[in-house]
Image (cartoon, helix red, strand yellow):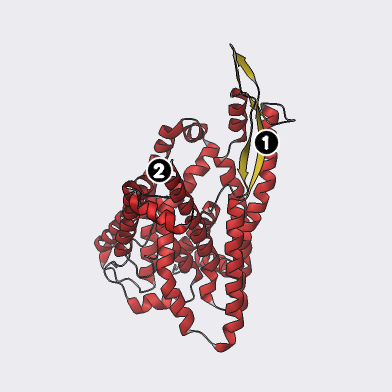
């Protein structure tokens, strides 16, 4: 089905058209909110603080571009993402939460999401307080007294929770994952600024470097598409069952195991873990306590070391890929369901042996996905260290998120079109 035919189907189908228009409308509201700054911002000092700051550049991705001008939605969806990480970790420690997430169906997942939303509120307060105190210490925000401080915190907390609500509305009434689309919109909206900065600092001698970066970007996009679409098919046979005069089963199919089961989530998780300690340390950077100041300065120097940052980032992405795959894909539950339905993998006994086999295959193919995500995450940091162009430092992560979200969106639109055609 060609693009023009799909576009005509979208225009003709009222429900699908309304879903797409709802997503566009929600993103317009989000971008309008991202352009409203909080009171007392010193724009000149803000621009100086943001220049060549890799930490704030990555944090700006989470805020959907709202941090670069200290808007009322400067925190973006990062408190909600942090809350989701904590809840996912909690499933490993608390069996009741694991049962709620995996075994109680849609109702259990809704309750699990509700817990994540409730946890977002205190996390938004902590992040808002820490970030405003950091900006106040740098002279970027002029806050007169505690009342004004807590008023600003309340505003940006409300902005963050409002964005989470918009994201959930997009997921329910639009197409695609709402939180991912908000991050995607922020990245796309920041492209003109990034291109203009690159153009202003452009020199003729940098042409080979920029061409090399363009070639690497195209290769990364191709790799993301290949790895995202790649899957390992596990053959499944259904045993024949005779009931009366009818024979059931006896068919063959396959279970698709994706090479990258986790998608872009490990990158987001790793970025959250990398950014949160830096925010806390920057908050204490102006302390008068000598012991604490020595510790903070030493830790910040380590985190600001390009090679240490890249290696630590790679390891986090690699580990989170395995972690998220283990949380979302349960080989034991799959093996139990196959056994109940009379299905089996040829040459593998049903039950525990099937679970072990699926776990072994998943571990092997996830290795490829984890290595690929880790390389994509740190490659721009390496290129930035080689070229000295700060704009390239966040290119790989942003590119990965954009391509993954676009692929997911295209699939969901195709599914909607196919459903309406049939």
Q: Position of residue 326 (x, y in %)?
A: 59, 42
Q: Callout 1: 10 Å neighbours few (<14), some, many (20+)?
A: few
**Residue most toward the bottom?**
204
Is 292 situated left or right of 176 in this image?
A: right
Q: Position of residue 135 (x, y in %)?
A: 38, 69
Q: Callout 2: 10 Å neighbours few (<14), some, many (20+)?
A: few
Q: Is residue 348 visible?
A: yes
Q: Position of residue 413 (x, y in %)?
A: 43, 50
Identify whether 142 is placed above or below 11: below
**Residue most toward the right?**
347
Is 118 situated left or right of 151 in this image?
A: right
- How many circles with numbers are drawn on the protein? 2
Q: Quadrant of residue 379?
A: bottom right
Q: Position of residue 371 (x, y in %)?
A: 65, 56
Q: Can you identify the residue that label 1 sits on?
A: 235
At a point 58% along the width and 68% down the height, the residue shown is 218
Q: Can you identify the residue that label 2 sits on?
A: 420
Q: Secondary structure at mark 1?
A: strand
Identify whether 257 is placed above or below 293: above
Q: Looking at this view, is 231 or 209 the one in front?
A: 231
Quadrant of the rendering where the C terminus is positioned: top left
Q: Is residue 163 visible?
A: no
Q: Looking at this view, is 345 or 77 the one in front?
A: 345
């Amino acid at each position: 089905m060609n693009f023009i035919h799909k576009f005509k189907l979208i225009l003709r189908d009222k429900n699908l058209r309304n879903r797409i228009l709802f997503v566009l409308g929600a993103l317009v509201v989000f971008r309008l909110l991202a352009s409203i700054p909080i009171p007392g911002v010193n724009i000149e000092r803000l621009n100086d603080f943001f220049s060549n700051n890799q930490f704030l550049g990555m944090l700006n991705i989470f805020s959907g571009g709202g941090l670069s001008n200290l808007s009322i939605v400067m925190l973006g969806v990062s408190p909600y993402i942090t809350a989701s990480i904590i809840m996912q970790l909690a499933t490993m420690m608390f069996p009741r939460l694991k049962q709620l997430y995996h075994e109680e169906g849609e109702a259990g997942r809704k309750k699990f999401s509700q817990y994540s939303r409730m946890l977002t509120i205190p996390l938004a307060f902590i992040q808002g307080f820490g970030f405003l105190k950091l900006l106040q210490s740098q002279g970027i925000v002029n806050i007169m007294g505690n009342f004004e401080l807590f008023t600003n915190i309340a505003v940006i907390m409300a902005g963050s929770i409002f964005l989470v609500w918009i994201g959930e509305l997009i997921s329910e009434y639009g197409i695609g994952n709402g939180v991912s689309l908000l991050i995607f919109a922020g990245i796309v909206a920041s492209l003109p600024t990034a291109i203009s900065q690159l153009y202003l600092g452009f020199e003729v001698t940098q042409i080979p470097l920029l061409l090399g970066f363009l070639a690497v970007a195209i290769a990364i996009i191709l790799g993301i598409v290949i790895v995202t679409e790649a899957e390992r098919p596990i053959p499944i046979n259904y045993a024949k069952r005779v009931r009366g005069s009818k024979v059931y089963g006896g068919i063959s199919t396959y279970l698709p195991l994706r090479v990258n089961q986790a998608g872009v989530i490990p990158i987001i998780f790793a970025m959250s873990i990398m950014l949160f300690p830096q925010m806390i340390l920057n908050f204490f950077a102006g302390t008068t306590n000598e012991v604490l100041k020595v510790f903070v300065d030493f830790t910040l120097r380590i985190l600001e070391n390009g090679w240490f940052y890249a290696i630590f980032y790679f390891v986090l992405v690699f580990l989170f890929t395995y972690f998220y795959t283990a949380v979302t894909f349960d080989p034991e539950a799959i093996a139990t369901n196959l056994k109940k339905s009379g299905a089996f993998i040829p040459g593998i006994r049903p039950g525990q042996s099937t679970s072990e086999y699926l776990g072994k295959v998943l571990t092997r193919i996830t290795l490829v996905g984890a290595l690929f995500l880790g390389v994509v995450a740190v490659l721009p940091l390496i290129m930035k260290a080689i070229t000295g162009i700060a704009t390239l430092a966040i290119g790989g992560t942003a590119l990965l998120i954009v391509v993954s979200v676009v692929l997911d969106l295209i699939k969901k639109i195709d599914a909607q079109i196919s459903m309406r055609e049939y």
